[in-house]
Amino acid sequence: QAQFVESGGALVEPGGSQRLSCVTSGFVFSQSVMAWYRQAPGKQRELVAKIGASGVQDYQDSVKGRFTISRDNAKNAVYLQMSSLKPEDTGVYYCNALWSYVDAAPRFHTWGQGTQVTVDS
């Protein structure tokens, strides 16, 4: 079964940077579209960024130009480099796979524990 282990979350000051990592197992990572989601307090989980098997990327409008998603197929890992962080970026960040690049819904029902990012001075 698919497993996801997210890490790298922290308390960060506004304008700061942080890099999140997600190590996966249980499915063919190299052929999968991967995504980062976040869940802000009191809100539903939302798709933030996605990366295709070829490396093509797309982002939620609110993070474009500030976040960069990347992948390492040799390590079955996906990363999220975040910069110019804002308080509204606060939330628990999760990774998952997508059925296709045009999808937003996660492919797997299982989720990792997530990693908490708090942007606050």
Image (cartoon, rainbow, N blue to C red):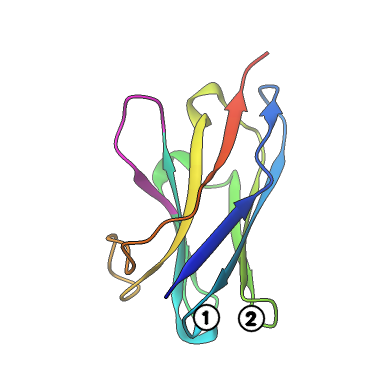
Would you say 50 lies left or right of 121 here? left
Image quarter hosting the C terminus: top right
| Residue 117, horizontal then vertical, whole percent | 59, 34
Determine contact: label 2, label 1, CB under 8 Å. yes
Would you say 18 lies left or right of 90 here? right
Of 31 and 26, nearer the camera is 26
Q: Amino acid at mark 1?
A: Phe
94, above or below 27, in the image: above
Pointer 2 residue: 73
Pointer 1 residue: 29
Residue drawn where x is 63% and y is 17% of the image = 120
81, above or below 2, in the image: above
Q: Amino acid at mark 2?
A: Asn
Residue drawn where x is 60% and y is 43% of the image = 66
Range of the magenta residues?
A: 40-48
Does dot 1 land on a helix, a strand or a loop? Answer: helix
* Residue sticking out furthest to the top: 121
Image quadrant in which you'd find residue 80 = bottom right
Residue drawn where x is 56% and y is 70% of the image = 24
